[in-house]
C-alpha cells in the first residue's frame, strides 16, 4: 500500500466487494467471483503499483466454498469474495445513470460529493461541474499514459470501469505485453479490438466524453451553449496531458 501511505493522512479510503452475489446490474449472471479471478486481480494491482500506476489494491480474498460453473475455464471452479481498497468507487456510469433518468438533481449531488471527498481544492470554483471534469480528465489522461508505458492492457474499458479519482481497478481479462503490439487485445470476447493496447487512450477519451454528456444535465437555463463549450474545453485538455505523461513515463521506463 505504498501509494496509499504516500497519499498522506486524512484522504478518504473506500472499501468495496467483488463477487459477493447478484445485484440489479448482474445481467443475469451469478454475481460471484472465481478464486482464480481474485488472484489475478491481486497480481495485476501489485505489479501496476510497482510500475507507478495509480491502482486499487486487494484488501482481502475470502474463499466461499461454492462451486461455480464458467464457460471460459474448467468447471466447476472455486468461488471467492474480493474486498478491494481504493480512494473512490464513484464510476462514470453513476453519472450516466442519473442523467439517463433525467435526475439532474442527483447529478448535482454526485458532483458535490466528489468535490467534497476527492477534490476539495475545487470547492470555490465558479463552475464546479466543469472544474470537476477538468480534474477528472487530467487524472484519467495520466492513468491511460501510465498503462501504455507499463505495457498493460486492461481489457474492458467501459464507463463502469473508470472512476473519478483516476485509479485503475476491476481487473478481469488483463494482460501485460510481451513485446510492443498496438493491436494486442486481452479479452477473448473483444473480437473487434475495441479495447486493444493501441486504442486504450481512444477508449478512455470516449468514456470521458460520456461523463461530460452526463454533466450537461446541469447546464444553467438559457446558458446551454456556453455550458457545452465549457465542457468541450475541459475535454480538449486530454491529448496534451496524455502526450506529456506518455513521454515522461516511457523515458522513465528506459532510465532517462
Image (cartoon, rainbow, N blue to C red):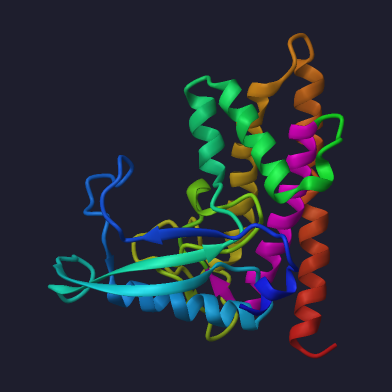
Q: Is residue 172 visible?
A: no
Query: Number of callouts in the render?
Result: 0
Q: Residue at x 73, y 10 (%)?
A: 221
* Residue situated furthest top in the rendering: 222
Note whether 238 is above or below 69 in the view shown: above
Residue 32 within the magenta-colored segment of the rendering: no
* Residue situated furthest bottom in the rendering: 255
- Please state the extent of the stretch shown in magenta in the rendering: 128-153
Residue 52 in percent (x, y) is at 69, 77
Majority secondary structure in the magenta region: helix
Q: Is residue 25 left or right of residue 198?
A: left
Q: Nearer the viewer, residue 43 or 154?
A: 43
Q: Residue at x 60, y 80 (%)?
A: 180
Q: Residue at x 51, y 41 (%)?
A: 93
Q: Quadrant of the C terminus?
A: bottom right
Q: Is residue 4 left or right of residue 232?
A: left
Q: Nearer the viewer, residue 108 or 249?
A: 108
Q: Nearer the viewer, residue 160 or 116?
A: 116
| Residue 111: quarter of image | top right
Q: Nearer the viewer, residue 237 or 84?
A: 84
Amino acid at each position: 500500500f505504498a501509494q496509499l501511505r504516500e497519499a498522506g493522512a486524512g484522504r478518504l479510503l473506500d472499501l468495496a466487494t467483488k463477487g459477493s452475489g447478484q445485484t440489479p446490474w448482474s445481467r443475469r449472471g451469478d454475481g460471484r467471483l472465481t478464486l482464480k479471478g481474485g488472484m489475478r486481480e491481486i497480481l495485476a494491482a501489485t505489479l501496476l503499483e510497482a510500475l507507478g500506476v495509480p491502482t486499487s489494491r486487494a484488501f482481502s480474498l475470502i474463499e466461499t466454498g461454492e462451486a461455480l460453473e464458467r464457460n471460459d475455464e474448467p468447471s466447476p471452479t472455486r468461488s471467492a469474495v474480493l474486498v478491494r481498497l481504493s480512494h473512490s468507487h464513484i464510476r462514470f456510469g453513476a453519472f450516466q445513470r442519473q442523467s439517463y433518468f433525467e435526475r439532474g438533481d442527483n447529478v448535482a449531488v454526485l458532483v458535490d460529493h466528489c468535490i467534497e471527498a476527492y477534490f476539495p481544492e475545487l470547492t470555490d470554483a465558479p463552475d464546479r461541474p466543469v472544474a470537476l471534469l477538468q480534474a477528472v480528465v487530467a487524472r484519467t489522461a495520466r492513468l491511460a499514459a501510465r498503462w501504455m508505458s507499463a505495457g498493460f492492457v486492461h481489457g474492458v474499458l467501459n464507463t463502469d470501469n473508470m472512476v473519478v479519482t483516476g485509479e485503475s481497478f476491476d481487473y478481469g481479462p488483463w494482460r501485460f505485453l510481451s513485446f510492443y503490439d498496438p493491436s494486442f487485445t486481452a479479452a477473448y470476447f473483444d473480437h473487434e479490438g475495441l479495447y486493444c493496447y493501441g486504442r486504450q487512450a481512444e477508449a478512455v477519451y470516449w468514456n470521458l466524453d460520456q461523463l461530460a454528456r452526463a454533466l450537461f444535465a446541469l447546464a444553467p437555463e438559457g446558458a446551454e451553449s456556453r455550458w457545452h463549450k465549457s465542457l468541450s474545453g475541459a475535454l480538449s485538455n486530454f491529448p496534451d496531458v496524455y502526450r506529456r505523461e506518455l513521454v515522461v513515463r516511457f523515458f522513465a521506463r528506459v532510465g532517462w
